[in-house]
Image (spheres, rainbow, N blue to C red):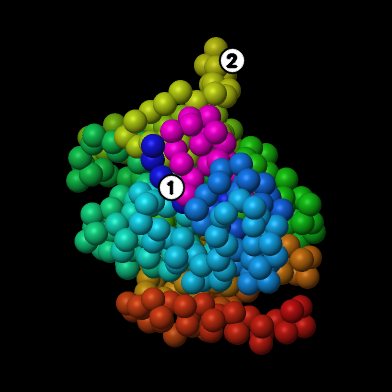
């Protein structure tokens, strides 16, 4: 039996991770953590009987503890609760499926405790990759990517010489607004943005896909995961989401990982790496697939991607500003308090106002996040 814990067990990746656990029956879930959805968390506790469950809100945790008293599962709360769950001695792998920078400290705690990381939290490497990757190397733990694009590259590179890689090609569906003009984007609604053509994801990530911010975060993450300069990472639009990403080698060969858009595949690959297992689900039928379409991303209209690349090239604390501003802007968009294009305005405004820290430590990263949030609250006070 492999013992795991899951940060973000009630979200899209967390629930699909538990689907993989149900199908295989040789993984034991010892820890579960959630933000607000204690109803679903209670159901998960009763099904999987972990040793420990964490809830971000202290009052919600106290209420849940009363409701699950009969199970014997201990309930903890807040950041201290997440850290305790991350260092559980019996756990060998932590699935980090929370959204946002809240995942950084628990991930680092798990690495220090010698646990492998199944990483679905982009913000961890985007803002603290310069801290995370050296720490993982020092502790001898694996960072196993769960995002479909990074998993695709990881699978392609299995058994290959990293020094022979020439370019990483990260694919993007283009999201729900592919082909729209900037004028058209000024009038899109929240419901429009949440209607992704291929993937079923959480609301925040779905909006990030619509702005192409998500692809920018993936470029920044790939830089650290695969030790690749930003200049060697290219984004290509592949609207069918059949090719999940590609690697070009120095001899010109391009290897790709293909499959149906099903997040259970990269999740299962990370949980059992390097073993592959049977996975129920739809298969690609090449007798029916007439063509695979490619296009260039529209960097003029969807400014999330070029702003992310700019932040990555500046480095230091700038990716934290980019990410923190986006988190706050998307939150306001989800509350329908700002328009779609204002997400870009908030990100760019925060980046322009920031004084760069060249090599921030964890405290400086978290302080940069707070300063960025304070800047947006001040500059856009009318909307907030």
Q: Which mark is residue 4?
A: 1
Instruction: From the image, tell me which residue sits under label 2.
Output: 288
Measured from the top left, where is residue 348 in percent x and y?
A: 57, 73
Name the N-terminal-most of marks 1 and 2: 1
Q: Camera-side residue: 362 or 85? A: 85
Measured from the top left, where is residue 140 in percent x and y?
A: 23, 54
Q: Is residue 170 visible?
A: no
- The CA span between labels 1 and 2 is 39 Å
Measured from the top left, where is residue 311 in percent x and y?
A: 45, 68
Q: Quadrant of residue 247?
A: top left
Q: Is residue 78 visible?
A: yes
> How many discs appear?
2
Q: Is residue 52 left or right of residue 329?
A: left
Q: Residue at x 39, y 76 (%)?
A: 362
63 to 258, vertically: above or below: below
Q: Is residue 31 left or right of residue 248?
A: right
Q: Residue at x 51, y 77 (%)?
A: 369
Q: Quadrant of the N terminus?
A: top left
Q: Which mark is residue 380?
A: none
Does dot 2 land on a helix, a strand or a loop? loop
87 inside magenta stretch: no
> What's drawn in magenta, residue-wise?
10-30
Measured from the top left, where is residue 158 in percent x and y?
A: 28, 36
Q: Residue at x 38, y 40 (%)?
A: 2
């Amino acid at each position: 039996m492999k013992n795991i814990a899951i940060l973000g067990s009630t979200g899209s990746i967390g629930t699909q991770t538990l689907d993989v656990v149900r199908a295989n029956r040789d993984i034991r879930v010892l820890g579960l953590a959630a933000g607000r959805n204690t109803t679903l968390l209670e159901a998960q506790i009763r099904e999987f009987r972990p040793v420990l469950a964490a809830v971000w809100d202290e009052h919600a945790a106290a209420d849940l503890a009363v409701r699950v008293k009969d199970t014997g599962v201990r309930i903890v709360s807040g950041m201290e609760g997440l850290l305790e769950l991350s260092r559980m001695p019996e756990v060998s792998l932590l699935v980090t499926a929370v959204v946002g920078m809240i995942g950084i400290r628990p991930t680092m705690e798990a690495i220090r405790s010698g646990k492998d990381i199944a990483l679905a939290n982009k913000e961890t490497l985007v803002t603290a990759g310069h801290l995370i990757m050296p720490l993982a190397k020092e502790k001898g733990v694996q960072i196993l990517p769960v995002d479909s694009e990074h998993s695709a590259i990881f699978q392609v590179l299995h058994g290959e010489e990293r020094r022979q890689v020439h370019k990483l090609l990260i694919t993007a569906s283009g999201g729900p607004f592919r082909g729209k003009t900037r004028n058209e984007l000024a009038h899109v609604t929240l419901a429009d943005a949440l209607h992704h053509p291929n993937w079923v994801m959480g609301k925040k990530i779905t909006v990030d896909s619509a702005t192409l911010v998500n692809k920018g975060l993936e470029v920044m993450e790939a830089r650290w995961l695969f030790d690749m300069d930003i200049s060697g990472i290219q984004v290509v639009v592949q609207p069918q989401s059949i090719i999940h990403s590609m690697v070009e080698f120095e001899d010109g060969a391009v290897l790709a990982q293909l499959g149906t858009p099903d997040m259970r595949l990269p999740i299962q690959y990370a949980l059992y790496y390097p073993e592959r297992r049977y996975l129920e689900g739809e298969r690609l039928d090449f007798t029916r697939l007439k063509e695979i379409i490619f296009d260039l991303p529209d960097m003029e209209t969807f400014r999330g991607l070029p702003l992310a690349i700019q932040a990555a090239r500046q480095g230091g604390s700038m990716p934290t500003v980019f990410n923190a501003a986006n988190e706050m802007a998307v939150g306001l968009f989800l509350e329908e308090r700002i328009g779609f294009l204002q997400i870009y305005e908030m990100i760019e405004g925060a980046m322009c106002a920031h004084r760069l820290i060249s090599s921030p430590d964890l405290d400086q990263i978290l302080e940069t996040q707070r300063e960025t949030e304070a800047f947006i609250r001040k500059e856009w006070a009318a909307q907030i």
